Amino acid sequence: MAIIQNIKIAVDAIVFGYENSQLFVLLVKQKFGDAKNSWCLPGGFVLNDESLTTAVTRELREETGVSVNYLEQLYTFGDNIERDPRFRVVSVAYFALVDPSKLTLKTITDTDAEKAKWFPIDQLPQLAYDHREIIDTAFSRLKNKLTYQPIGFDLLGTEFLFSELENLYTTLLEKNIDRRNFRKKILGFGIIDETDKIASVKSGRPAKLFKFNEKKYRELEQNGFHFEIKFN
Amino acid sequence: MAIIQNIKIAVDAIVFGYENSQLFVLLVKQKFGDAKNSWCLPGGFVLNDESLTTAVTRELREETGVSVNYLEQLYTFGDNIERDPRFRVVSVAYFALVDPSKLTLKTITDTDAEKAKWFPIDQLPQLAYDHREIIDTAFSRLKNKLTYQPIGFDLLGTEFLFSELENLYTTLLEKNIDRRNFRKKILGFGIIDETDKIASVKSGRPAKLFKFNEKKYRELEQNGFHFEIKFN
C-alpha cells in the first residue's frame, strides 16, 4: 500500500466483579506518560505476534494479576481519532465477569500500571482516555445480556443463596421484581440445583444454597431452550 | 512505547441484500496483489485521519457504488495473525442490510477492486483471506437479530406483501412457521401498516401491500415493547 498507516492497535479489558450487592470494575493506576496517576482500564498494545485475545489476557494478568478463562469481545473503539492524546490508537475492548472473592490483585513491576483496584460502578474515579465511555458500553451490554443469557451466575460464587441471585438482578437492572414469580421462573428453567447446604442469612432464617448447572443449561439450549428474564 | 508495532488496521463491509426469496452478499473482485482475481468483501485500510465508520463507508462506496446510512459493527478479526498472507492485518468488520433493487453497482477505477457483484449466500465463490469466516459470523448475527429486532424490513422493499415477509423469515431461518400464528403475531405488534395498494401474486389472488412503521416501533420500544419472533 502506498500510504503509511500510523495507527496503533490496543486492547482493553473491562472486568466486572460483584460483591455485597455491588458491581465493581477493575481499574489500574497509570505509572507513566500523559495519563500518569490517572485510573484507566487494564490494557495495552498488541504485540506483533500475538492474537488479540492473547494480548488482552496478557495485559490483564500483568497489570492486575487476574487470569480469566474467557473474555468476550465487546466493541472496537476507533471512531474518535483523538481518543488517545499521544497518537492514534484503535482499541479492541473485551469484557469478563468474575467473582472478586476468589482473586488477589497483584501488579507486575515491569508494566505501565502502578496498582490495580476494584471500584464500585457508581463511584468511578476520573478516567483517562475514553475509558468512561468504554465502561458505559460494557455496562449496557452486561445489563442487556443478563436478560437473555445466564451470565449472572458468573458474578456469584459457585454456591449462592437465592436471595443473592435476586439481589443481583434487582441491583444491576434497577428494577423491582415480583419475588415469587422470579423464583418460580428461575427454578422452572431447571438450570440451578439446590445443594444440601444451608447458609445463615443476616436477616431472616437460614436458607438453602444453590448451584448453577451449566451442563444442564447447555443441554437444554441445544434443544431450543432460551433463558429469558423479563421485567415490565 | 519501545517496541514497534507492525500491524495494519482494515475495515470490511458485509452487505446483505434480499431478492426473490434469496439472500445475497455483495462481493468485489480483487484487481491487485496476491488475491488478484479472487473475490472478497469490499473493504480496505483505514486512513490516518478517518474514523473506522468513515473508512468502511468510503471503501464500500468506492468499490461497489453502494452508499448506506448505517453500518453496524460486527466483530474485529485479529486472532489469526496470518489472516492476510502479506503482513498482519486486523480487520474491523461492519454489516448492513439493503434492498438491492434500489442499488446500482459501480466500481470506481482507482480502487483495489475490479468489479462488484451480488452472490447468493449459498453459492459463494472461493473467498480470499478469512472472508468466508467473516461472512459466516455476519450471517449468524443476522439470523439471530431477525428474532429480536425488526431488521427484516430493511431487507424488503418499502412496500411488501405479507407473504414476502413470511418468506424472508422461513428462508433465512430455515424454519417452518405456522402461517396463521405468524401473521397474527406480526400484525398484533402494531408496527406494520396496511396500505391501500394491492399487488398481484404469482400464484393466488391479489394481496394487500404493507409498510413498516418505524416511528410507531420506536414509540412502542420506548414503552418497553420487545419485538420477538419465536420458532420451536
Image: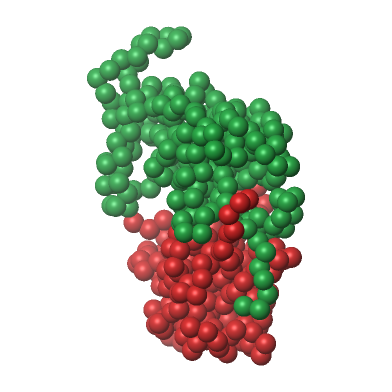
Chain colours: A green, B red
Whether residue A75 can be seen here: no
| Image-quadrant location for residue A9 | bottom right
* Residue B158 falls left or right of residue A103: right
**Towards the viewer: A204 or B208:** A204
Quadrant holding the C terminus of chain B = bottom left
- Residue at 63% x, 50% y: name it: B1
Q: Is residue B212 above or below residue A128?
A: below
In the rendered image of this protein, does residue B45 appear above or below residue A13?
below
- Residue B196 is situated, as x and y percent measured from the top left of the image, at 64, 75
Q: Which residue is drawn at 28% across and 25% down?
A: A194
Q: Give the image location of residue A135, x and y in percent.
A: 61, 41
Question: Does residue A124 appear anywhere in the picture?
Answer: yes
Given residues B97 and B36, the one toward you in this image is B36
Residue lying furthest front in this view?
A: B2
Question: In the rendered view, would you say A219 is above or below B105?
Answer: above
- Dividing the picture into quadrants, the one containing residue A67 is top left
**What is the count of numbered marks?**
0
Q: Which of B140 and A105 is in front in this view?
A: A105
Horizontal and vertical percent position of residue B195: 63, 72
**Relative to residue A214, is residue B98 drawn left or right?**
right
Q: Residue furthest left?
A: A196
Q: Where is residue B140 in the image (x, y as percent from the top left)?
A: 43, 63
**Residue drawn at point x = 67 percent, y = 71 percent:** A4
Q: Which residue is at a point 50% across and 39% down the rendered structure image? A: A62
